[in-house]
Amino acid sequence: MASSGQGYGTPGPIGSDEPTALGGDIPTVGDVDKKWDSTARTTTPEIIATGATLADVKRSLDASQGKHWGEGGGKLTMDRVMGVKRGEKFTLTLRGHFINRIPVWRDREQASDAAKKEWDRFIARLSQHEECHVAIALDHFEQFASQVVGTRITELQTVFDAAQKELEAAQKKLDTDTDNGTLRGVKCGDAELDASIK
């Protein structure tokens, strides 16, 4: 019931003052400025669940969110690279953002104690599942930041796109392995709401 994690954003224009430079004269990434806070999470816009019972909540979320009741992961972008000189090593700025959005039950106080307990259990598990997506995103961001050093400016887009595909595949694998977080007894799983509880 979780969305696959987000990935890399399309970077801004990448250019050089001397685009015709060849071979060793082509500017390359010499350093990376990593601009992200691994503890910060985007939690908005809110995912709202309504209804006085868990069955009502399930219908509400199925209607508004489909199979993915939460969202977790991250997005990485590159700042534009401009004004570099022939043969220069430049600093590439990467910006990462992480997200963990889970539903808010607007009518929770109308529910029974048993329903509240089940909801709280479910939400904790769903949040943990989304954090697994965040961990995958962070790991890939760090890998990209390390591996991109030495990359020619003319190859940045290709390298960036390849990294995006790898991240998307890793996020999809997590959801496949855990059945979108609902599979019981597995890491990053057990995020299934028991809507039969009154």
Image: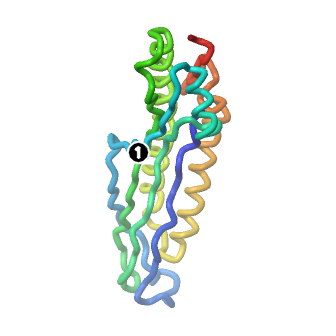
- Residue 35 drawn at (x, y percent): 32, 56
The residue at 47%/75% (across/down) is 153
Q: Point out the image quarter for the C terminus.
A: top right
Frontmost residue, 153 versus 137: 137
Q: Please name the amino acid that badge 1 sits on.
A: Thr
Seen in the image, is 179 located left or right of residue 80? right
Q: Residues within 10 Å of mark 1 (few under 14, many from 20)?
A: few
Element under disc 1: loop
Q: Nearer the viewer, residue 2 or 159?
A: 2
Q: Is residue 133 above or below residue 143?
A: above
How far across and how far down the image is residue 139, in percent?
46, 44
| Residue at 60%, 18% in the rendered image | 195
Foreground pick, 107 / 185: 107
Q: Which residue is mark 1?
A: 44
Q: Quadrant of the N terminus?
A: top right
Rendered location of residue 51, percent (x, y): 52, 26
Report the number of numbered marks.
1
Give the residue drawn at x 52%, y 37%.
Answer: 70
State the residue at coordinates (53%, 49%).
Answer: 6
Coordinates of residue 156 in the picture (x, y in percent): 51, 70
Q: How is the image coloured?
A: rainbow
